[in-house]
Amino acid sequence: MNSQVPEMSKQQASAVGQPFTRNDDACHDLSIRVRDLNLWYGKAQALNGLNIDLYQKNVTALIGPSGCGKSTFLRCLNRMNDLIPSVRIEGLVEMDGRDVNAAKMDEVALRRRVGMVFQKPNPFPKSIFENVAYAPRMHDIVSRKGEQEELVEKALRDAGLWNEVKDKLHEPGTSLSGGQQQRLCIARAIAVQPDVILMDEPTSALDPISTATIEDLMDKLKKQFTIITVTHNMQQAARVADYTAFFHLGEIIEYNDTKTLFSNPATKKAEDYITGRYG
């Protein structure tokens, strides 16, 4: 067992948001710490006492049946639930020792550090170039035209899209195929140099070839970024994730390194879901 996790039972480890076994090849530096997180939509509680530690430069997959709280939890990490008037949140979501829900937290700065890629590609109604350059320019990351061009090329290269679009940068982003649009959205997210990228079922609307391209991209991007992704695809989670958290009815039932969770789940609920007995 890794030295960062003291001797503890599986039950104790789960209670403090730690996987009770570790992927020795993965980074174990903490990115986001969540403790006793509860969320309500009006009077209906959607998240119930969540505890989890999310690690830097890994892919963490959130799995579980529809409506179990995965996407709601994801949106807690960059305060996108603040945009829903009926939402009430209690508990701690912490980055770098700071509670992201604190009144003094700059939400714009937070969302720069914790980017989001949605289920359906949503490029801006602008050129491919402007889709990538706009936010860095607004955040004063770049100003001069040469800096913008350099940043756009790097982001598009990192997103695996440069060679496909380098000769049509001033065409609309919406002119690209669905898979290309999603990679453009990833380029847009990484252009502002975030620490974390949230992905909410990023391949569910894509064909198998585009899905494989995005999965390969996730594997490359985790060398630079922490990636947290929601997926309903068990095979995808097994392929891309270093860690996997199984959600059910607003709770985290089990959290472990992916290989262990899929090969030897500790709970009957997780085993039943992974083996397809419900979902």
Image (cartoon, rainbow, N blue to C red):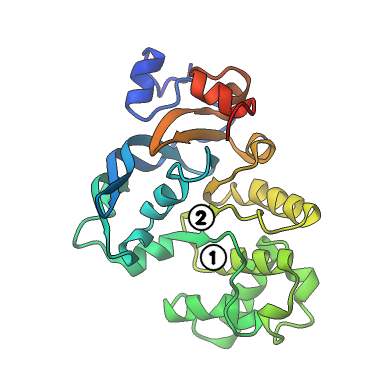
Q: What x and y, as percent, mark residue 138?
A: 44, 81
Cβ atoms under marks 2 and 1 closer than 8 Å: yes
Q: Is residue 205 above or below residue 155?
A: above
Question: Mark 2 Cα within 10 Å, few/some/many (few <14, many 20+)?
Answer: many
Q: Amino acid at mark 2?
A: Ile
User: Which residue does the numbered mark 1 point to in the structure image?
Assistant: 189
Q: What x and y, as percent, mark residue 75?
A: 41, 55
Question: Mark 1 Cα within 10 Å, few/some/many (few <14, many 20+)?
Answer: many
In the image, 37 versus 98, the foreground residue is 37
User: With 223 as the anchor, is 137 left or right in this view?
Assistant: left
User: Which residue does the numbered mark 2 point to in the structure image?
Assistant: 197
In the image, 263 versus 111, the foreground residue is 263
Q: What x and y, as percent, mark residue 49?
A: 29, 36
Q: What x and y, as percent, mark residue 206?
A: 72, 58
Q: Is residue 244 above or below residue 218?
A: above
Rendered residue at 61%/28% (across/down)? 274
Rendered residue at 54%/28% (across/down)? 257
